[in-house]
Amino acid sequence: MSFRHKHILGTENLSREDIELILETAESFKEINQRDIKKVPTLRGKTIINAFFEASTRTRLSFEIAGKRLSADTVNISGSTSSVVKGETLEDTAKNIEAMAPDIIVIRHGHSGAPHYLAERVDCSIVNAGDGTHEHPSQALLDLMTIKEFKGKFDGLKVAIIGDIAHSRVARSNLYAMTKLGMEVRFAGPGTMIPVGFEKHGAIVCDNIEEAISGADVVMMLRIQLERQANTLLPTLREYARFYGLNPEKLKLAKEDAIVMHPGPMNRGVEISTAVADGPQNVILDQVANGVAVRMALLYLVSGAEMVEE
Ligand code: CP
């Protein structure tokens, strides 16, 4: 099956077949990351710009590593070191980047819709590395790859996603993708952090964390995104940790073989206790490892390159 998408803007417009193709491609690239020489010539001659206008550790590093392992020329710019700080618009910045003939721009931006705005205005491929509170498609795809590795399937799995759903682009991208793959998605969090309308996309909104976690195969904890809240939406972090933090006692409500996920960065002692974050059910660093393979797959698929081994 061929990949029809020039851009990766979100999981909302990816079909089940698209997602399966991305994950199969990522699985084939994962082996490269375990070799002594972690490099193939697949994207030789291609130029990838990683334009990050918001902070990032995992996504930025793994897109850069992904591009380099595929032999692309990767160049990074950040908001704080670009001419954006001198008042240049996003469109002007993108047009200037495009004048240097990149093949792919990977963009993280604080405004929801920024990657879509660029996709309509530039000729190269745009890959969304997280836009505001909207989508974070590569995160959802690496989450799915990790779930497949540990659970061997998608259909029928029960996933509890707990925390600041309203501001979470990870929750949104996972909801769109997981429901397409036949998974049951349950959300729980403080009432002020659960947006209305997710039920129409197939989410089950639970009254409390215990209800969401009961019998779950996968428990995904989310950070409170204080940087995206105009007003503080919770009384204290201590109270949040008590009612919505995951500790070993609450985790016992999930299936015995449930896995615990977190997209990072974690706030230990708030949404997740150290005992759980470092405990036997956590797959958090497996998620990070799979992030490189998934991003290799995305860069490869949008570039339309041929797979070549040396
Ligand atoms: N999960 C995630 O997006 O992490 P970073 O913000 O470090 O990229």
Image (cartoon, rainbow, N blue to C red):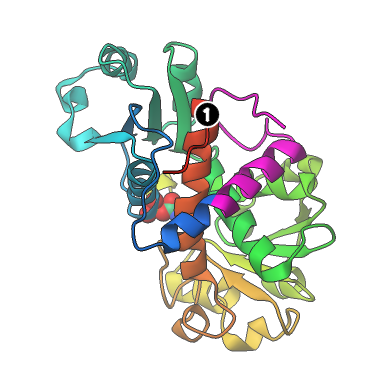
- Identify the element where label 1 is drawn: helix
Dividing the picture into quadrants, the one containing residue 16 is top right
Q: Amino acid at mark 1?
A: Val
How many numbered marks does the figure carry? 1
206 relative position to 21: left or right:
right
User: Mark 1 — residue?
Assistant: 302
Question: Where residue 233 sits: x, y (%)?
Answer: 50, 55
The answer to whether 277 appears left or right of 104 in the picture is right
Residue 232 belongs to the span the image colors magenta: no
How far across and down, in percent of the image, does residue 123 sit? 44, 12
Relative to 251, is 217 on the left or the right? right
Q: Residue at x 63, y 88 (%)?
A: 249
Span of residues in magenta: 1-28
Image quadrant where one finds the N terminus: top right
Q: Nearer the viewer, residue 298 or 165?
A: 298
Name the foreground residue: 237 vs 71: 71
Residue under the image location 43 percent in, 48 percent down? 231
Could you tell me residue 105's position as x and y percent? Answer: 38, 27
